[in-house]
Image (cartoon, coloured by chain):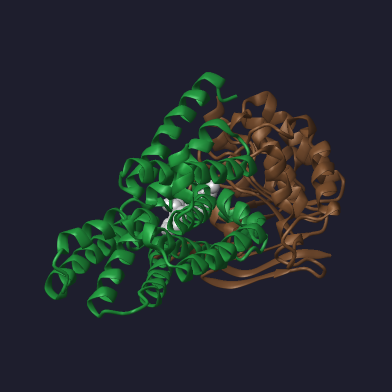
Amino acid sequence: MDQLALYFSYPFVRYALVVGVLIALCSSLLGVTLVLKRFSFIGDGLSHVAFGAMAIASVFNLSDQMLLVLPVTMLSAVLLLRTGQNAKIKGDAAVAMISVGALAIGYLLMNLFSTSTNLSGDVCSTLFGSTSILTLKQMDVWVCIVLSVVVVAVFVLFYNRIFSVTFDENFARAVGTKVNTYNLLIAIIIAVIIVLAMNLVGSLLISALVIFPALSAMRVFQRFLSVTICSAVLSVCCAASGILISIVQGTPVGSTIVAVNIVVFVVFAIIGKIGGRS
Amino acid sequence: MAELICENLVLGYENTILIEDLNFEVNKGDYLCIVGENGSGKSTLMRTLLHLQPPVKGRIAFGEGLSATQIGYLPQQTIVQRDFPASVWEIVLSGCQSRLGHRPFYSKEEKQLAEQNMKRLGISDLRKRCYRSLSGGQQQRVLLARALCATEKLLLLDEPVSGLDPKVTAEMYRLIAGLHKEGITVIMISHDIQAALQYATHILHIGQQVFFGKTNEYLDSPVGRQYLNMEGGRQN
Ligand SMILES: Nc1ncnc2c1ncn2[C@@H]1O[C@H](COP(=O)(O)OP(=O)(O)O)[C@@H](O)[C@H]1O
Ligand SMILES: [Mg+2]
């Protein structure tokens, strides 16, 4: 306990916690929609694109990588959604192509042009999350806070539409809801979340952060609203405890958070079984 | 007064034409049944009426005071995933989504409307239940209540009784007939020609031959007789 109190006196620990909790909150909100709309693969694909963009940004030594990574990821989100809706190209094949392609190109570029002496270390930390969450500057924290507030506000304001579009797209379209616009909105929010979350858990583990809380909540709750709230709470708790554990034990941040999420999922699955999903 | 007019409608998908040169109109208070073989394009017609897909050619016009968004729709087998967590209340209320305009949340009146429609269909006590835990008949009532939240004028129902047992089917037909008596125009796709003949005021038969007219005219038409014989033969 004393040790924990000591850790909290360091600003970098507080920053990490604030950022981690906010990212976890944002990523869990859309998890339910993503899982139910079978969009989870898009999240996965986008994270690879973000990795590729990150590699390019670091090759060109851009001072603010966000400026490149965010627009590129958003654009890919829009494109992936388009192809997903197009019956001619199988949606998941297109996603697989883009995501694996981005991953390969990204790695290749880093290999060819990187000036770093610890290349595999760099790659590993981009994929699995770095300790960079522990070296956040105040500016990063503010960017994260602003983006999170925007994401949460958009989600709350469009909650009813997101529900309608997720539950029954055809009915929504038939009564005049602008389904395509909302799908686009969802895709863009996902892109923002993924770019945000890359610092926390790395691009390979983002999907876990998005999907696990929603899956856990769906084991136990039966209403869309309760599932959404529960997955937000779960995600925040898992992130907070994951970060604390990793600081105390010296484990990698991203993997620790995902591991906590997995434990929670198992617990909820058992509760769901025992409680008998009526 | 015509609520819906279709002129020279050609329906199909990119490379296939399903129905050619379809003309019919639906007046206020009509109960139109659309019948025809499996795969003849009944659902396609309904999806086109709802602007879910464009017609290949032709014109669909809605009557005065009825915009395309004032239609209640009950899809054929809603592809709701097995594990979708949603309560009956959440689903019925989502029928009010076209009334939202630019507001983010549902108003008191919209919640009352959802409440009334649940009462109307006798599902008030299912309010908190999870949709996926309901029986087939209950699920259809929930979706019908949602459709009623979207409209007071025109209901489009795509095989509302498919998969239901005979008793529940009969109840469902009575429910829809009741709504029709209250003044709602009904367009229903049905497999069940007997029920269509019993309740519908008009029949639209699509397939190789097309028929549109009053129910009693259908009985006397060659298309109708042939189809009835065939369906009758199948049931025996
Ligand atoms: N999205 C689609 N693209 C191409 N053909 C389709 C599509 N949907 C349905 N069809 C075809 O259109 C025909 C009519 O389908 P449908 O309207 O569902 O028939 P019904 O409802 O009368 O049974 C079928 O042969 C079906 O294979
Ligand atoms: Mg059909």
- Residue at (30, 44) in percent of width and height: A251
Q: Residue furthest top?
A: A274
- Residue A230 in sight in this render: yes
Q: Is residue A113 left or right of residue A152?
A: left
Q: Nearer the viewer, residue A85 or A65?
A: A65
Q: Quadrant of the N terminus of chain B?
A: bottom right
Q: Position of residue B164 (x, y in %)?
A: 61, 30
Q: Is residue A26 left or right of residue A198?
A: right
Q: Is residue B161 left or right of residue B202?
A: left
Q: Is residue A18 above or below residue B197?
A: below
Q: Nearer the viewer, residue A43 or B117?
A: A43
The image quadrant of residue A185 is bottom right
The chain drawn green is chain what?
A
Q: Is residue A167 above or below residue A68?
A: above
The image quadrant of residue B67 is bottom right
- Residue at (38, 57) in percent of width and height: A134
Tag count: 0
Q: Nearer the viewer, residue B114 or A4?
A: A4
The chain drawn brown is chain what?
B
Q: Nearer the viewer, residue B230 or A160?
A: A160
Q: Position of residue B38 (x, y in %)?
A: 50, 45
- Residue B32 in sight in this render: no
Q: Position of residue A126 (x, y in %)?
A: 28, 60
Q: Position of residue A60 (x, y in %)?
A: 25, 80
Q: Quadrant of the C terminus of chain B?
A: top right
